[in-house]
């Protein structure tokens, strides 16, 4: 029994790693193996099935992902049920069509020969405005005669502050 749990943990962890790297087909295979090693009604069984939903989405098998989610809406664990209901809502939502202007054509070697193109979503590149170089001024050439006002204002501030302190 303990050996099955260890094998499950290894398969589940490997499946998660593959899923995180975007290797969805390998992830489906590994997670299915993990699922066969555990009770699907347990919390871990629910977790592995939720990961399978994501992996099936990654390979475009939305119907399989929806079928698993529908099963999980009757799972004994409340958290698994709630999470599967949220995912199921998203999976069944209507797909919005993206305008072709939002897509960027990326030619591949195979696509060039057949005339087909593959679209990927991309943001248009923004050009940053060039900043002019900073110009430093020589302080010895500045007119400092007008700074007398600042000295006078600072002096008055010190006198008023001193008077207020003397009152307290």
Image (cartoon, rainbow, N blue to C red):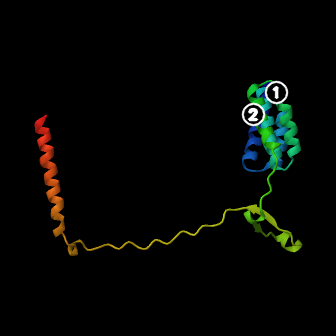
Q: Residue at x 73, y 50 (%)?
A: 21
Q: Is residue 72 above or below residue 94?
A: above
Q: Earlier in the sequence, mark 1 or mark 2?
A: 1
Residue 86, image x, y percentages = 76, 36
Alpha-carbon neighbours of circle 2 within 10 Å: few (<14), some, or many (≥20)? some
Query: In the figure, is residue 134 to the left or right of 106?
Result: left
Q: Secondary structure at mark 2?
A: helix
The answer to whether the residues at label 1 and label 2 have Cβ atoms under 8 Å apart is no
Q: Nearer the viewer, residue 29 or 83?
A: 83
- In this view, which residue lies farthest toward the bottom? 141
Q: Residue at x 14, y 49 (%)?
A: 158
Q: Secondary structure at mark 1?
A: loop
Q: Residue at x 83, y 36 (%)?
A: 69
Residue 79, image x, y percentages = 73, 28
Residue 58, image x, y percentages = 80, 49
> How far separated are the C-alphas under marks 1 and 2?
11 Å
The residue labelled by disc 1 is 75
The residue labelled by disc 2 is 83
Residue 30, image x, y percentages = 82, 41
Q: Nearer the viewer, residue 46 or 131?
A: 131
């Amino acid at each position: 029994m303990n050996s099955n749990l260890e094998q499950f943990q290894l398969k589940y962890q490997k499946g998660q790693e593959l899923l995180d790297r975007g290797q969805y087909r390998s992830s489906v295979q590994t997670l299915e193996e993990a699922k066969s090693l555990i009770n699907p009604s347990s919390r871990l069984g629910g977790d592995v099935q939720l990961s399978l939903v994501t992996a099936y989405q990654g390979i475009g098998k939305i119907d399989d992902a929806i079928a698993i989610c529908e099963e999980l809406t009757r799972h004994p664990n409340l958290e698994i049920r709630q999470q599967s209901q949220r995912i199921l809502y998203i999976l069944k939502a209507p797909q919005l069509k993206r305008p072709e202007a939002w897509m960027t054509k990326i030619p591949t070697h195979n696509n060039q020969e057949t005339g087909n193109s593959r679209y990927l979503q991309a943001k248009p590149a923004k050009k940053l405005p060039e900043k002019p170089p900073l110009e430093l001024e020589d302080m010895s050439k500045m007119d400092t005669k007008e700074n007398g006002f600042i000295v006078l204002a600072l002096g008055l501030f010190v006198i008023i502050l001193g008077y207020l302190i003397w009152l307290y």
